[in-house]
């Protein structure tokens, strides 16, 4: 099955990433746990797939392109560069931050990045 790539405003994201973001990954215990944690934390921020959550994440990914970089999280490999950016988010139940990792193939920082992952942190 092909993994469709969704074109956002200034970034791309693979369709399968939404399975990971919204709690549907069951490939192994670690990934299952992380996927369910994403679901819980996104829900606390008011981001629910059934009520526009995909669209909200697409907006967050767009806004994240201009968010502050976490310099210690920058990763360079022979294949490309990953840059993590932190975007503050407020929901009805909690506030928090979403750390978005953007991947730049061949380390071309002028290219359109791919959303590689996210980590959600809610504040108590």
Image (tube, helix red, strand yellow):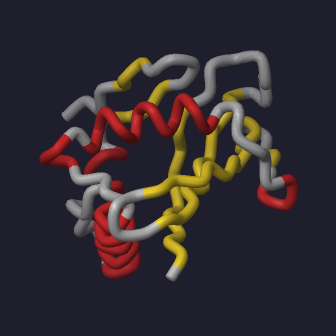
Residue that lies at the very extreme toward the right in this rendered image: 71
Q: In this view, does 110 lie above or below 87?
A: above
- Residue 56 pos. (x, y %): 36, 38
* Residue shown at the point (76%, 39%) measured from the top left: 81
- Residue 9 pos. (x, y %): 50, 17
* Residue shown at the point (71%, 44%) measured from the top left: 82
Taking the image as shown, residue 39 lies to the left or right of residue 100, namely left
* Residue shown at the point (48%, 26%) measured from the top left: 12
- Residue 104 pos. (x, y %): 69, 31
Quarter of the rendering occupied by the N terminus = top left
Q: Is residue 30 above or below residue 73?
A: below
- Residue 35 pos. (x, y %): 34, 67
Residue that lies at the very extreme toward the front in this rendered image: 92
Taking the image as shown, residue 23 lies to the left or right of residue 73, namely left
Q: Quadrant of residue 58?
A: top left
Taking the image as shown, residue 61 lies to the left or right of residue 56, namely right
* Residue shown at the point (32%, 81%) measured from the top left: 29
Q: How many tags in the picture?
A: 0
Q: Quadrant of residue 21?
A: bottom left
Q: In which quarter of the image is residue 68?
A: top right
């Amino acid at each position: 099955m092909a993994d469709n790539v969704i074109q956002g405003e200034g970034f791309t994201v693979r369709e399968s990433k939404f399975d990971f973001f919204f709690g549907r990954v069951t490939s192994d215990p670690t990934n299952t746990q992380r996927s369910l944690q994403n679901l819980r934390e996104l829900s606390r921020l008011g981001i629910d797939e059934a009520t526009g959550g995909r669209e909200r994440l697409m907006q967050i990914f767009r806004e994240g392109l201009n968010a502050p970089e976490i310099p210690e999280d920058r990763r360079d490999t022979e294949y490309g560069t990953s840059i993590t950016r932190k975007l503050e988010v407020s929901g009805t139940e909690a506030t928090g931050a979403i750390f978005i990792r953007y991947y730049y193939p061949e380390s071309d920082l002028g290219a359109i990045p791919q959303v590689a992952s996210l980590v959600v942190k809610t504040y108590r």
